[in-house]
Amino acid sequence: MKILEADFVLTCNEEFEIIRKGAVAFEATIVEVGESEHLKAKYPDATHIFTPPHSIIMPGLINAHVHLEFSANATMLHYGDFIPWLQSVIKHREYLSQMATTELIAEKLQLMLRSGTTSLGAISSFGADLEACAQTAQRVVFFNEVLGSNPGTVDAMYGDFLGRYHQSKDEASSTFFPAIAIHSPYSTHPILAKKAIELSFADQTPLSTHFMESLAEREWIDEGKGDFTQFLTAFNPYAKPMCSASEFLELFNSTPALFTHGVHASDKEYAHMASCHGTLTHCPMSNRLLGVGALDLEAASKHAINLTVGTDGLSSNISLSLWDELRAALMMHTNSPLEALSKTLIKAVTCNASKALNLPVGKLEKSLLADIIVATLPQEVDSLEQLPVQLILHTHQTHLTFINGELVC
Ligand code: MCF
Ligand code: FE
């Protein structure tokens, strides 16, 4: 047994309890969380791990939404407006996916680990990230994505998706979980979406989708007009919205899903997501770079919807570090009080994300798996209320990282 002690233990439990001079006793799972002196007396034979002054022990971070296959992008994609970005993705997709080798993706996963991300929800469009995700030290929920709107090709698209899904099932392990993603209401025929959702229900996998990211998506789905018209009619001159937003959402009624972006979702839609135990995944950097606007966090939180945060891919971000993402969120939501927002964001990347991805981690609590990180602040902190704020502002890499109780970096 190990005992890890530090100036602060940020449990991320229901009460968001913070323990001063605290410790965590753990093996592969957490045995006990409490005050250092108490744990040391109770487990005298445990191996002690000390940390520098101003250190914080907390659960490993969970990135709920990342596209690793776009990791080769730095400057090639067009930022500022959604449809030009989508056009640039289509133009460069082949080149970028060729460049995103297993080695490059493994390198990005290692950087994510160094910044404290111990679990992730990886959206896989082609399966090129399978090997790196199956081999990495982190816990990966591997969302095989399905899309296709042309009735002539939906069967082939579904077949391709099924092939990738089955390949990912062959890799299933205690740290790798095959799962399913429906791309979006504008790109995925509801029949295709329904089949994939039924499969997700039968296999009890997590489920993810992009939903109401841009105003263009809102206008297209609601009225069949706006910036998507020209984009979609280039593929199919008779293109029409394939279903309404509520018909799309209803497909997810029986399985709690992660809805990514939701910047242009309505109050009624947030309420629907919440009533189906869904999750809203916020990607602030991506939203800014793709020019879709800022999520109204207040509106979403009114409905007590489970909130998580994702970096999206390097196709719409400059970093896959959740600390960078949380800093962006702190700066973006200028109307939210700083201390309350910091707490909300820390919960979003720990306990809320573990709930969304159905992983037995995300809190420092007896019996959960010991995915634990240590962050060290440069100076003392004024009060416990300030701790989440300063943690977000000052953390780049972790001091120590444990997965399943084992030191991984
Ligand atoms: O979340 C962002 C923006 N919204 C939609 N899709 C993507 C994002 N980052 C990468 N994508 C991928 C998506 O998975 O881009 C493709 C899909 O494979 C767009 S559809 C041609
Ligand atoms: Fe995405």
Image: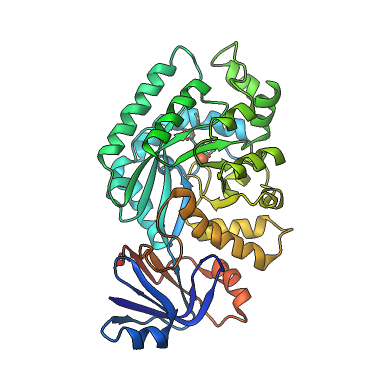
Q: Horizontal and vertical percent for residue 323? A: 51, 61
Number of marks present in the image shown: 0
* 263 in relation to 220, above or below: below
Q: Is residue 92 above or below residue 30?
A: above
Picture quarter with the C terminus: bottom left
Q: Is residue 363 left or right of residue 327?
A: left
Could you say where residue 30 lies in the image, as x and y percent from the top left?
36, 69
Residue appearing at x 50%, y 76% in the figure: 377
Q: Which residue corresponds to the image point at 61% horizontal and 43% vertical from the top-left?
A: 275
Image height of 281 relative to 216, above or below: below
Residue drawn at 49 percent across, 28 percent down: 90
Name the residue nearer the viewer: 31 or 212: 31
- Specify the quadrant of the image occupied by residue 264: top right
**x and y percentages locating residue 206 in the rendered image:** 43, 42
For the point 57% across and 26% down, the residue is 186
Task: Depth check: give the residue in front, 288 or 194.
Answer: 194
User: Can the viewer see residue 229?
Assistant: yes
Q: Is residue 292 visible?
A: no
